[in-house]
Image (cartoon, rainbow, N blue to C red):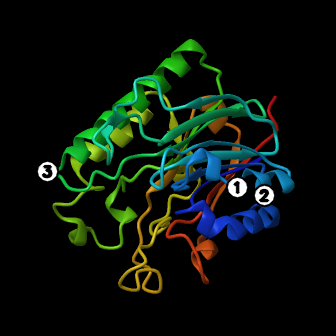
Amino acid sequence: MRIATWNVNSIRARLERVLAYLDANQIDVLAMQETKVKDAAFPAEAFAAAGYKVAHFGLDQWNGVAIASRLGLDHVACGLPGQPTWSGRDGQSEVEARALGATCGGVRLWSLYVPHGRALDNPHLTYKLAFFEALRQAAATWLAADAGTQVGLLGDFNVAPVDSDVWDRSVFEGATHVSPAERAAFAALADAGYREVSREHLPEQHRYTFWDYQQLRFPRNEGMRIDFAYCSPALADRVSDVAICRDQRKGKGASDHVPVELTLAIST
């Protein structure tokens, strides 16, 4: 079983690349973030033609999360239990399209797009930390209810947990993504009993998953590692390999993120 997570940065702009990636890499389930479309505009027919069922949660041209699966797609949930709200562009507070859960091949997967935070003195950072806390509480509840449950929390976490996850720590002094509060919120998922399997299998430095489009960040390899896969113990024990698909950042029309792939052993 092969599972991947990918911030596609607009599914309409990246559709052909995503479909080609699924076919070339024989991905069974793909969690996507930043689809940037409403539900009605998501190209579900193209995924169906490729053999995938899709669940999508999108409210406007921002955010948006999806799960495409050829192993079944059951018990779809839009939003986390207790997910905080944010004031949208119309001034109305709403649960943004940042979390989508579905059961695929016996595994409960969540596609997650954690808020950016914007700046250390911005209310969006408080929102980000509240989102992390809702995720921690929900994840802990699932594990407490069933210690053998197979749950994967996949996506763009918008946190670089250690200094080697950015090309130059000094560039981020006083900025988001590396602050003690954000790193503590990220680590709290481990305290809740989950394991971040990409680090377990790829511990080396400079395993970046994101390179900004500006200032030649990718050619200079000035990247960040902010896309991760937290797994419950039962699921983490099945992970036999992890890959970060750096080549997907190359070429015309690439997303600024690349896929992170998990290979799972057959469940016993």
- Can residue 108 be seen at all in this image of the molecule? no
Residue 99 is situated, as x and y percent measured from the top left of the image, at 51, 38
Residue 24 is situated, as x and y percent measured from the top left of the image, at 80, 67
Per the image, the residue denoted by label 1 is: 43
Residue 147 location, quadrant:
top right
Contact, mark 1 vs mark 3 (Cβ under 8 Å): no
Residue at figure coordinates x 34%, y 56% from the top left: 162
Above or below residue 218? Residue 131 is above
Residue 46 is situated, as x and y percent measured from the top left of the image, at 78, 58
Name, please, the residue furthest toward the front. 90
- Can residue 51 be seen at all in this image of the molecule? yes
Label 1 vs 3, first from the N-terminus: 1
Q: Residues within 10 Å of mark 1 (few under 14, many from 20)?
A: some
Per the image, the residue denoted by label 3 is: 121
Contact, mark 3 vs mark 2 (Cβ under 8 Å): no
Q: Amino acid at mark 2?
A: Ala
Q: Which mark is residue 59?
A: none
So how many labels did they put on this image? 3
Q: Which mark is residue 46?
A: 2
The span from disc 1 to disc 2 (Cα, nearest Å) is: 6 Å
Where disc 1 sits, the SS reads loop
Q: Amino acid at mark 1?
A: Pro
Q: Is residue 234 left or right of residue 145?
A: right
Q: Report the mark closest to the observer, 1 or 3.
A: 1
The span from disc 3 to disc 2 (Cα, nearest Å) is: 42 Å
Residue at figure coordinates x 49%, y 18% from the top left: 141
Residue 253 location, quadrant:
bottom right
Label 3 vs 2, first from the N-terminus: 2
Above or below residue 111? Residue 79 is above
Q: Amino acid at mark 3?
A: Asp
The residue lying toward the viewer, choosing from 158 and 205, is 158
